[in-house]
């Protein structure tokens, strides 16, 4: 990855992705509290998440514009290309979120999570090898295997999960949407001509438009006896695991290898498990601890390897320029 193209160091991109993964992990707990406080459905919640997140991103966009280079704004793409990228990314985002909620409803949270987040790194590793010529290597393959093992132990450790074929299909569709979004973000980041603020704004605008008719059919305005609490929860969902997390995600995914991105994003169930223990009173089981340690170790290993690879590439570029 040429940092001259993206303007973001790989180390900072890794940090952005770690923060995004942890922030995503809080969305499930917040959504559970939303469901307890109202009769809002998953599609309506996804719509309001996208709509409110879009408003926040638009408000923050002047602060996120990339610095100008050579008399023009860095990351500026022709209008037609920008619209195409926003449409494809927004569709991927809408499929990713909505299919996941459908999988949760069909087969339960545990199976939906392990299939979606487990299939994602596999799809991305294959897609990155075929379309981006990115190789994991032995260490990367071992890290991905360790992360997937940790995910399975973490999510299915309770042993009370039930598998329904329809839910698995929805989860695989969700993983496919996430994989397309990640691979295209990485490809466009390597080619230049885009920035995180524009990518986030465009994606949320398209995703919100796609979700609106389904949200209207489900019930756009919820009934609640706790309107203040509901508004605070929706504001949190829009601000932290949406506007902040996706803004950091699109920035980091543009400079970090796709397979590494997919594994770092597995921090989401780790954060969710930690919140369940700390805030919701759930017990810390051996499976939770073992799965968390496996996944954190895999993420740390890939992050170190990614940073070393970026430094080596930078030294080779400097040596070739001398």
Image (spheres, rainbow, N blue to C red):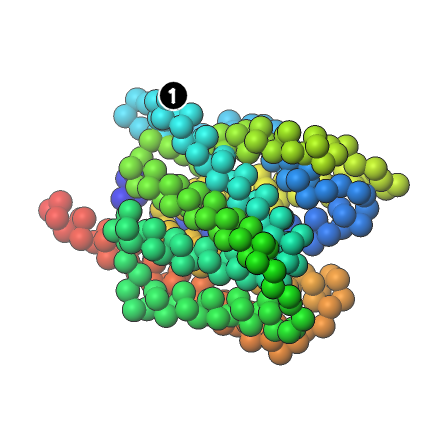
Please provide percent x and percent y for residue 231.
Answer: 77, 38
Q: Is residue 33 left or right of residue 150?
A: right
Foreground of the two, 98 or 82: 98
The quadrant in which residue 187 appears is: top left
Q: Is residue 228 left or right of residue 270?
A: right
Q: Residue at x 70, y 30 (%)?
A: 216
Q: Is residue 100 left or right of residue 257?
A: right
Q: Is residue 40 above or below residue 56?
A: below
Label 1, secondary structure: give it: helix
Neighbourhood count class around disc 1 (C-alpha, 10 Å): few under 14, some 14–19, many 20 upward: few
| Numbered circles on residues, count | 1
Name the residue tied to disc 1.
79
Q: Is residue 12 above or below residue 306?
A: above
Foreground of the two, 164 or 191: 164
- Residue 266 in view: no
Q: Residue furthest right?
A: 225
Q: Residue at x 67, y 71 (%)?
A: 160
């Amino acid at each position: 990855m040429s940092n001259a193209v993206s303007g973001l160091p790989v180390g900072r991109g890794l940090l952005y992705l770690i923060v995004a993964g942890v922030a995503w992990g809080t969305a499930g707990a917040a959504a559970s509290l939303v469901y307890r406080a109202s009769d809002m459905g998953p599609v309506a919640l996804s719509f309001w998440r996208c709509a409110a997140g879009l408003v926040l991103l638009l408000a923050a966009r002047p602060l996120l514009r990339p610095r100008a280079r050579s008399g023009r704004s860095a990351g500026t793409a022709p209008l037609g290309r920008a619209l195409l990228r926003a449409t494809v990314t927004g569709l991927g985002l809408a499929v990713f979120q909505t299919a996941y909620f459908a999988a949760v409803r069909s087969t339960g949270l545990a199976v939906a999570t392990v299939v979606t987040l487990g299939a994602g790194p596999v799809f991305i590793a294959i897609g990155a090898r075929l379309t981006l010529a990115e190789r994991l290597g032995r260490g990367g393959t071992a890290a991905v295997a360790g992360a997937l093992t940790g995910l399975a132990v973490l999510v299915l450790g309770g042993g009370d999960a039930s598998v329904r074929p329809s839910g698995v299909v929805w989860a695989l569709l969700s993983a496919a949407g996430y994989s397309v979004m990640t691979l295209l973000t990485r490809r466009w980041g390597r080619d230049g001509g885009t920035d995180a603020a524009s990518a986030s704004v465009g994606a949320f605008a398209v995703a919100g438009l796609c979700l609106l008719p389904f949200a209207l059919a489900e019930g756009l305005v919820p009934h609640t006896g706790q309107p203040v609490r509901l508004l605070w929860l929706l504001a949190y969902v829009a601000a932290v695991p949406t506007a902040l997390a996706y803004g950091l995600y699109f920035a980091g995914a543009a400079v970090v290898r796709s397979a590494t991105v997919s594994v770092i994003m597995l921090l989401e169930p780790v954060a969710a498990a930690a919140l369940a223990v700390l805030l919701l009173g759930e017990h810390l089981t051996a499976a939770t601890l073992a799965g968390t340690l496996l996944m954190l170790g895999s993420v740390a290993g890939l992050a170190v390897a990614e940073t070393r690879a970026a430094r080596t590439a930078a030294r080779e570029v400097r040596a070739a320029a001398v």
